Amino acid sequence: MLHLVKKSINKNIILAILVVGTMMASIDTTIVLLAFPTIVSGLHSNFLTIIWIILVYLLVLTVFTTQLGRVGDIFGRARIFNAGFLIFAVSSFLCGIAPTDIFLIASRGAQAMGGAMMAANSGAIIADTFEPQHRGRAFGFTSLGWTLGATLGIVLGGIITTFIGWRYIFFINVPIGAVAFILGVRYIKSNPRVKSKLDIPGMLLFGGAISAISYGAIDSIAGVFSYLHLALICAGIITLIGFVVLELRTAEPMLDLKQFKNKVLRSSILSAFFQSLGYLAIVFLIIMYMQGVRGLSPFDASLLLIPGYVVASSLAPFMGKLSDKYGSREIATIGIALMCAAIFIYLMLTATVSYYVWIIIAASIVSGVGSSMFFPSNNRAVMANAQPGSYGATNGLLRTMSSLGIMFSFVTVISIAAHAIPKAAAFEIFVGTTVLIGNISHEFMTGIYAALYVSLAVLVIAGILSAVRGRDSTTGYKKR
């Protein structure tokens, strides 16, 4: 009996460490957004340079997450995860003491590498630690850490920057990371290693493809879209096709594409991509509305989003338990439907409506309930249908697709919402340095509406993929 109690306590400690790791990695995708004006001033830099402190983080996270999941399969997930904690904490300190903008950007790249090491292996460690019928609850916590962390980072960035100083958005990671690293080394045990070789050619092709596509897309928002950006994106797509051909012919591929014959796995990963693309775009749009049209400060704007975070964080573990009992398809799909409903509420916003605060709060709560249903259920479906020897690679791919969604949601928002104003001005609105006045605010609203409809269409695709995925191949619930 005592042994069982100790085992249960150890599992909960491991889960807490995983939640902290995934949340830290995710929060830092967006925590710097509302600190841009003070960072530019503090480092005597400029907008076109400082924008890369977020873009380089997203780029590194997107490119390396899948590969690091595979590395965890081969060399031990606990080792890679714990090393990621250490790298993240050290690089966060370097970010905090950065004397120049280039030093800060380089440190952010190292920080992203640590974050990718944690994100790529967290889901696989859950699959190693928890029985299939208990994984939904665990994914409820870690999914909360990852997906809501990106949004919560905006709130924390506003609060810390306003009341303490921008350097502390990085320093706060150091003591947390140090304690979590020590606990991780003690409690998280590495999985039995997969006897396999690293697929170096596959890693290079995949990394090159994603880098070219990502760089071409995100660099275009810092200036005018050019033939160079188009060439990079096209080259990336061609390289990605070459990667697929190579993986199908390789005996020990980085990513076993034959797994995608499993309809549940394929649909769940694609659903995660489209959900991330549509969902984060909505958050970005509403921040632009609050700051650019309504003139709220970054701090005040972040406060209006808190009710949705509270609801999501409260319900996610419970929704994860429901997916353990009833399966993932229905719960995840209803979650997407609620996110779509939130968009219709947001569409009630205008440049002059007097009760806009209540519209935003109501929509954020509905969206929060939806996210608490989708994330743990969908992640559980992915890991339930992954091959045991490929937990790390599959979880890494899931995180890569989510990171791609976050990155392209950023590009989509700036591009579509800014059709009436320059993209640089749209970004200044987002970070709270510009407020629109007069007719231009009404014109900007047409851009927001257009982007909301695009987000709605993207979420509908995610919902369709979720609905047609089929049932989980797991013993956690009874099949009907």
Image: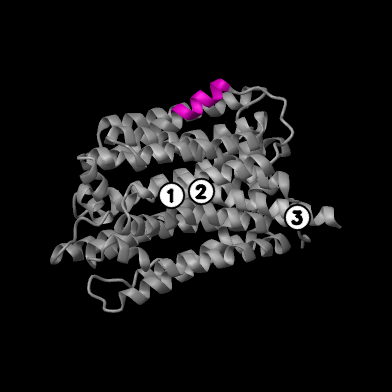
**Horizontal side of residue 257 vs 431, given as left or right:** right
Q: Choose mark 1 or mark 3, whichever is in front.
A: 1
**Horizontal side of residue 182 vs 410, given as left or right:** right
Q: How many marks?
A: 3
Residue under the image location 70 percent in, 36 percent down: 190
Looking at the image, the residue that sits furthest to the right is 1
**Horizontal side of residue 272 vs 30, given as left or right:** right
Which x, y percent locates residue 376? 60, 57
Q: Which residue is mark 3?
A: 8
Label 1–label 3 contact, CB within 8 A: no
Q: Which residue is mark 1?
A: 172
Q: Is residue 421 magenta?
A: no
- First in sequence: mark 1 vs mark 3: 3
Amino acid under label 3? Ser
Marks 2 and 1, Cα distance to the nearest angstrom?
7 Å
Amino acid under label 2? Ile
When asked about the image quadrant of residue 198, the answer is top right
Q: Which residue is mark 2?
A: 176
Label 2–label 1 contact, CB within 8 A: yes
Q: Secondary structure at mark 2?
A: helix
Which x, y percent locates residue 128? 72, 44
Q: Which residues are magenta?
A: 200-208
Which x, y percent locates residue 86? 53, 37
**Crowding near the residue tagged with mark 1, few <14, some 14–19, many ≥20 C-alpha atoms within 10 Å:** some
**Horizontal side of residue 322 vs 412, given as left or right:** right
Predominant secondary structure, magenta span: helix
> Which is nearer the eye, 92 or 263?
92
